[in-house]
Amino acid sequence: GEDVEQSLFLSVREGDSSVINCTYTDSSSTYLYWYKQEPGAGLQLLTYIFSNMDMKQDQRLTVLLNKKDKHLSLRIADTQTGDSAIYFCAESIPGGYQKVTFGTGTKLQVIP
Amino acid sequence: DTGVSQNPRHKITKRGQNVTFRCDPISEHNRLYWYRQTLGQGPEFLTYFQNEAQLEKSRLLSDRFSAERPKGSFSTLEIQRTEQGDSAMYLCASRGDTQYFGPGTRLTVL
C-alpha cells in the first residue's frame, strides 16, 4: 500500500542547513517529490527525483534517496526566513493515472 | 500566467447549498487531477481525467461530488448539498513531465 510519513516540525536558525526526512512504503514508486506550501497557498514543486537515482542537487537543495530503506531527505543549505513553510514529501507509483500520494507535511520554522 | 489557475480562490457557503469550482490546467497538459486538503494534512487524491475522460475516482468522492472536463481543457468540481465536513482546500493539478498544482480553492461551509 501507499503510505508516506514525515516528522511534523523542524526548527533551524537562519544560515544553518535544514534536513527534512521522509519514509515511504511503496517500493514501486517511480518519482519522489518535494513540494513547498506557504500559508494559504497552493503547492510549489521544489524538486523531484527518479527512483533510479541516489541524489539530485539543485542550487541550495539536495535530495538523497535510499531506496533500500525507502528513505528520502531534502537538505536546504543556508536556510533563509523565506524558506519557512510546510514541506511535503510525495510519491507516485506506476500505473494508468500516476496519482501522487502525499505525506502529512513538515513545518519548517526558520529562526532569524 | 501559464500555470494552473483555479477559481474562485475562496468560497463561503451555507450548509446544504451547491458549489462549483473551476480549474484551468496548463494548456498542453492532457492529464488533470483534483485533490482535497484539510487542515494539517497533505492533499488527498479525489479524481483524475485524461483529456475529457474521467478515469479514476477516489472513494473520498461521495455521490454529492461530481467532476467534469467536457472539452478536455478546463474542469469543474461540483459539490451538492454541502456539509461542514466538506470545508477544505480543493486543489487542481495538471501533468506534463510532472505534476503542477494550482493555488487552490478554499471552501468554508457554515
Image (cartoon, rainbow, N blue to C red):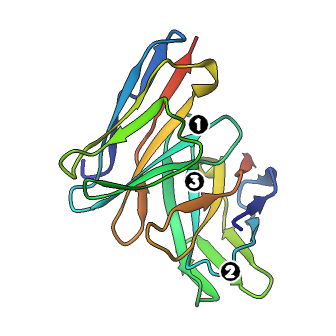
Q: CA distance from mark 1 to mark 2?
A: 26 Å
Q: Secondary structure at mark 2?
A: strand
For label 1, the crowd category at 10 Å Cα-Cα, with few meaning under 14, some 14 to 19 and many 20 or more, is: few
Give the mark, 1 or 2, whose residue is nearer the N terminus: 1
Q: Are both tags, 3 and 1, on one chain?
A: yes
Q: Chain of mark 3?
A: A
Picture layout, residue A68 above or below residue B53? below
Q: Which residue is mark 3?
A: A36
Quadrant showing the N terminus of chain A: bottom right
Residue B25 in the image: x percent, y percent? Answer: 29, 50
Q: Which residue is mark 2?
A: A64
Q: Which residue is mark 1?
A: A39
Q: Amino acid at mark 1?
A: Pro
Q: Residue at x 71, y 51 (%)?
A: A104
Picture layout, residue B101 above or below residue A54? above
For label 3, the crowd category at 10 Å Cα-Cα, with few meaning under 14, some 14 to 19 and many 20 or more, is: many
Q: Secondary structure at mark 1?
A: loop
Q: Residue at x 59, y 36 (%)?
A: A39
Of B28 and A94, which appears nearest the observer? A94
Q: Is residue A80 visible?
A: no
Q: Chain of mark 1?
A: A
Q: Is residue B64 visible?
A: yes
